[in-house]
């Protein structure tokens, strides 16, 4: 149980008895729709049935945990979907529930959130190194397909830390360190102070119990004096503000144990810590905040350099408030915060207080918080299109990076990661502004587009309606939003160019052979081509010619000779020598313009012995020579070889069998990271006596693959590593 200072004495933070009815009453203050409340009750009943008979280590029924988690996320004013997912967040890992069952009963959105929480709850910190903590933060945020997953994860950890006393003392410290290194930074970035502050105190309690209790005892010794000073100062400020007709609410508090510990850690002695008393004044309007701080400064002398305007310049996590420290009653120092009710809600609940789930239209980005949410959505949307970029990396760089704050000429604030350029700024305003950018003026000085912006810069973007993006921008832009928009533009441009090029090549070849376009490219022939080549329409045929997948002569010959695709390919292969100047990854006999695919069954990589197979509608498919699907010689098999001049990378599968003592996913991912190998996807299957991890990774060659296999085999918990056959 956690001991804490309540303003009166040293107490034990015992959890109150909990039931669904108690939590439901609190939920009704936030959720009003009867159909949503009915769905929440249904979720509770489902979870109750799945967890029936299960106990937590502290002896309580297991269902009390999801109830507490739901209560915590509800305190953040989240939507019904989040509360439902919180009640269900353990039914997959501890209730033997299938994803399909969740989806059928509660919808795909809830199922996806629960699935993500289930995955990240299996991850653990490998060791106490900073590298491991940073990496786990990246993976955890990357696997959170929706920011609501992070809300539930933080609530889940908060309740587990409240009951941390029930586990082994060593595990208590391990869990506290993991919370401190991984989850508290995420809570900070999301701005959820109510969770962050309690987690900080809990971690200090378990990692440094003697220090924690010592601070509490000192607070208790001076509790009467502290309470009197707080009340007297509160009464004084109340009188000042009331005299000037301001409407407000005022609260006093002793700073948290963790906050006092930080001051002691910086070298201060107990009798040198004066500003442990804090007051918070909450007002209706922003203008009232500035008026109030001015009135207080007129009565009580502020300490130089301790006034902070986080309203005009919000913190990196979007926190807004005015902070000042003044010499108050009897010369004691008081830290006083001035903020609006909206700012106060955000200070405690962070991103959750601004997450608009119930609006279905696109709303204008009007604040830094909305920019952050827009950025989060953008990363999710573009991740599916951008296979070359790790989602976890993007989220970490954009959402958890050190931020700067710059201004438009009209004074609007824009949040960007440190190192961002005017091009990043332009795309943050709007993709059209980014696409049309031709120049930038920072603080009334013309700067190059790769100029690194700094805090407080005033940025003006020069645009031209005829301008287009420049590929060189990809070398210096910082945000994934800008990178994705630039890549998307050039992908579309390249596709249109190749399409027109293919059409022109085909028309010229038909004229050269004195063939009528309408006759050769009749509707019947187009249907035949699209079916044989597995294309969608005439545009795809043009595109296949423009990108040199097929020659115009091959297409025309296919139609005029009425032969099958594989027959035409075979004839070409048998009549040409090997082309040593081929620019493709695979060298085939004289047909470098033909589509070549890597077999999905065995997924060869450069260095493997390979064989080609002429496949209907798929060109030539390259298999490993020992592939189980190549069972006997056939005329469809042709010799192929790797092109040593190519520098491509290849996707391949590894099947990793590990002990079942715990989920070793984080350890395995760390092994890949040390060799800078990109993981495209992974699946985990849990058996009675082992875990099986199916990981698809990207490698440059067989040598690189062999090294990672050896690394994995040397891990003490790994039983077997093999490739797909």
Image (tube, rainbow, N blue to C red):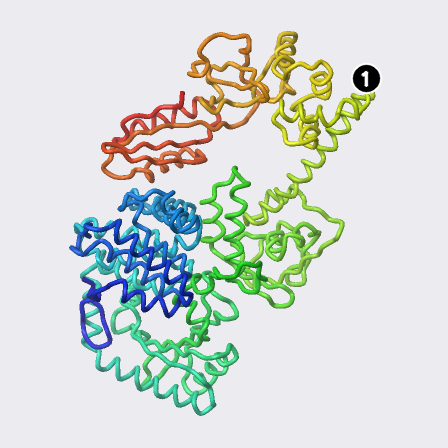
Give 687 or 310, whichever is nearer the viewer.
Answer: 687
- Is residue 607 shown left or right of residue 426? left
| Mark 1: few/some/many CA within 10 Å (<14, 14-19, 20+) | few
- Left or right of 650 in this view: 722: left
* Rendering coords of residue 375 (x, y %): 53, 54
Q: Quadrant of residue 192?
A: bottom left
Using the rendered image of the protein, determine whether residue 183 is visible from the camera's viewpoint.
Answer: yes
Residue 180, quarter of the rendered image: bottom left
Q: Residue at x 68, y 46 (%)?
A: 469
| Quadrant in which the C terminus is drawn | top left
Residue 38 at what x, y percent from top left?
A: 36, 61
Q: Position of residue 616 (x, y in %)?
A: 58, 19
Total numbered labels placed on residues in the image: 1
Closer to the camera in the image, 683 or 262: 683
Vertical placement of residue 328 versus 376, above or below = below
Nearest to the observer: residue 507 or residue 591 = 507
Rendering coords of residue 45 (x, y %): 29, 55
Q: Residue at x 34, y 87 (%)?
A: 235
Give the residue furthest to the bottom: 243
435 lies left or right of 609: right
Would you place residue 455 above or below residue 542 in this image? below
Residue placed at 64% from the left, 60% from the top? Answer: 442
Which secondary structure lies at badge 1? loop
Circle 1 is placed at which residue position? 513
| Residue 134 visible in rendering | no
Q: Locate the N terminus by quadrant.
A: bottom left
- Horizontal side, residue 384 vs residue 33: left or right: right
């Amino acid at each position: 149980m956690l001991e804490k200072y309540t303003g009166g004495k040293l107490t034990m933070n015992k959890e109150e008895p909990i039931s669904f009815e108690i939590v439901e009453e609190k939920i009704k203050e936030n959720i009003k729709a009867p159909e949503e409340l009915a769905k929440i009750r249904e979720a509770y009943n489902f979870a109750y049935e799945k967890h029936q008979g299960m106990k937590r280590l502290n002896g309580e029924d297991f269902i009390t945990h999801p109830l507490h988690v739901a209560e915590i996320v509800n305190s953040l004013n989240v939507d019904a979907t989040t509360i439902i997912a919180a009640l269900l967040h353990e039914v997959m890992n501890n209730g033997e529930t299938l994803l399909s069952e969740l989806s059928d009963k509660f919808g795909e959105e809830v199922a996806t959130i629960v699935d993500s929480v289930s995955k990240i709850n299996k991850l653990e910190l490998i060791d106490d190194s900073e590298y491991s903590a940073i990496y786990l933060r990246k993976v955890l945020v990357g696997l959170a397909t929706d920011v609501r997953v992070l809300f539930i994860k933080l609530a889940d950890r908060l309740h587990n830390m409240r009951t941390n006393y029930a586990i082994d003392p060593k595990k208590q410290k391990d869990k506290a360190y993991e919370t401190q290194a991984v989850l508290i930074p995420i809570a900070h970035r999301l701005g959820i102070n109510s969770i962050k502050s309690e987690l900080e105190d809990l971690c200090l309690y378990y990692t440094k119990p003697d220090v924690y209790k010592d601070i509490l005892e000192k607070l208790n010794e001076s509790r009467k004096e502290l309470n009197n000073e707080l009340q007297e100062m509160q009464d004084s400020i109340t009188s000042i503000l009331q005299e000037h007709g301001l409407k407000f609410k005022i609260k006093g508090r002793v700073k948290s144990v963790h906050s006092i510990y930080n001051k002691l850690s910086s070298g201060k002695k107990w009798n040198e810590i004066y500003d442990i008393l804090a007051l918070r004044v909450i007002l209706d309007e922003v203008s009232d905040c500035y008026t109030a701080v001015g009135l207080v400064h007129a009565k009580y002398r502020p300490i130089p350099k301790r006034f902070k305007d986080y309203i005009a310049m919000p913190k990196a996590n979007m926190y807004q408030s005015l902070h000042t420290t003044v010499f108050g009653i009897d010369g004691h120092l008081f830290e006083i915060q001035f903020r609006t009710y909206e700012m106060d809600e955000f200070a405690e609940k962070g991103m959750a207080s601004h997450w608009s789930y119930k609006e279905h239209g696109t709303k204008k980005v009007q604040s830094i918080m909305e920019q952050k949410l827009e950025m989060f959505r953008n990363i999710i949307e573009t991740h599916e299109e951008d296979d070359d970029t790790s989602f976890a990396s993007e989220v970490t760089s954009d959402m958890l990076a050190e931020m700067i704050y710059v201004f438009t000429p009209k004074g609007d604030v824009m949040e960007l990661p440190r190192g961002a350029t005017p091009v990043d700024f332009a795309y943050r305003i709007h993709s059209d502004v980014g696409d049309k950018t031709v120049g930038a003026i920072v603080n009334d000085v013309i700067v190059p587009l790769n100029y690194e912006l700094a805090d407080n810069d005033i940025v003006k973007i020069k645009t031209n309606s005829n301008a287009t993006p420049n590929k060189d921008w990809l070398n210096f832009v910082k945000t994934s939003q800008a990178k994705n928009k630039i890549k998307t533009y050039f992908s579309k441009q390249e596709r249109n160019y190749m399409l027109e090029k293919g059409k022109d090549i085909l028309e010229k070849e038909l004229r050269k052979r004195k063939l009528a376009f309408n006759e050769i490219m009749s509707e019947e022939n187009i249907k035949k081509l699209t079916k044989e080549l597995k294309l969608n329409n005439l545009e795809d045929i043009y595109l296949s010619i423009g990108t040199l997948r097929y020659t115009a002569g091959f297409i025309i010959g296919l139609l005029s000779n009425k032969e099958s695709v594989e027959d035409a390919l075979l004839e070409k292969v048998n009549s040409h020598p090997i082309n040593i100047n081929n620019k493709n990854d695979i060298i085939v006999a004289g047909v470098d313009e033909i589509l070549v695919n890597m077999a999905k069954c065995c997924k060869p990589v450069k260095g493997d012995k390979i064989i080609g197979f002429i496949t209907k509608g798929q060109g030539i498919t390259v298999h490993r020579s020992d592939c189980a699907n190549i069972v006997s010689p056939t005329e469809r098999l042709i010799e192929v070889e790797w092109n040593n001049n190519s520098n491509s990378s290849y996707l391949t599968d590894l099947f990793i069998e590990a002990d079942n003592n715990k989920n070793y996913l984080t350890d395995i991912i760390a092994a890949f990271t040390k060799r800078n190998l990109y993981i495209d996807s992974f699946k985990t299957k849990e058996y009675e006596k082992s875990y099986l991890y199916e990981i698809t990774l990207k490698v440059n060659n067989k040598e690189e693959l062999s090294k990672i296999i050896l690394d994995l085999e040397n891990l003490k918990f790994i039983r077997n590593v093999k490739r797909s056959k």
